């Protein structure tokens, strides 16, 4: 069974950091681009970042560039999202998802991704 499982979310104070993990089972990630998305209550799911299959190319949406860092360890079949300088508006459920191709698109659009994890909650609050 193909599965992506996110972990690492939690409650953090403004300015704090978290590292989210996206682990795959049932398939290997090293052929596919992986994206991170988030969905806040009452809002649409939005793309955060994407990393290509090799890890050499990454995309970020504008508001997260410089604060979030995507990376991957294909030997561990895992993709990471390091969140720093967190703000209350970063509060959301964060999802990882796999494309069916090795490269990222510029848009990081949810419609381009096939397999999704169940999400991990990130809450930024004092």
Image: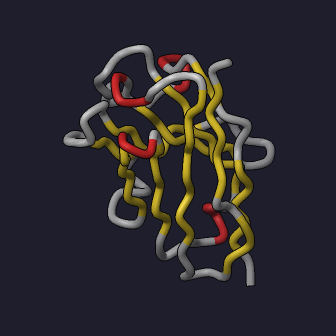
Residue 111 coordinates in the image, percent (x, y): 54, 18
Q: Residue at x 28, y 43 (%)?
A: 58
Residue in the image at 35% along x and 16% along y: 101
Number of labelled discs? 0
Q: Position of residue 61 (x, y in %)?
A: 40, 46
Question: Where residue 90 sits in the image (x, y, percent)?
Answer: 61, 61
**Closer to the camera in the image, 7 or 82:** 7
Residue 70 rendering spot, x and y as whole percentages: 38, 52
- Which quarter of the figure has residue 23? top right
Q: Which quadrant: the C terminus? A: bottom right
In the image, taking residue 114 as reference, residue 3 lies left or right, namely: right
Residue found at the far left of this picture: 56
Q: To which quarter of the image does residue 63 belong?
A: bottom left
Q: Would residue 117 appear left or right of 111 to someone viewing this image?
A: right
Camera-side residue: 72 or 122? 72
The residue under the point 64% across, 61% down is 8
State the residue at coordinates (68%, 77%): 12
- Placement of 63 over or under 44, stated as above or below: below
Colouring of the image: secondary structure
Q: Quadrant of the N terminus?
A: top right
In the image: residue 80, left or right of residue 93: left
């Amino acid at each position: 069974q193909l599965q992506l499982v996110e972990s690492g979310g939690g409650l953090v104070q403004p300015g704090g950091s978290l590292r989210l993990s996206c682990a795959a089972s049932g398939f290997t990630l090293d052929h596919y681009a992986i994206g991170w998305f988030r969905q806040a209550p009452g809002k649409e799911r939005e793309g955060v970042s994407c990393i290509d299959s090799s890890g050499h190319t990454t995309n970020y949406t504008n508001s997260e560039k410089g604060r979030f860092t995507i990376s991957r360890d294909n030997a561990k079949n895992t993709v990471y999202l390091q969140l720093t300088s967190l703000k209350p508006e970063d509060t959301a459920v964060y999802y990882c998802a796999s494309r069916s191709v090795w490269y990222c698109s510029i848009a990081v659009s949810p419609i381009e991704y096939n397999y999704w994890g169940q999400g991990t909650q990130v809450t930024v609050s004092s």
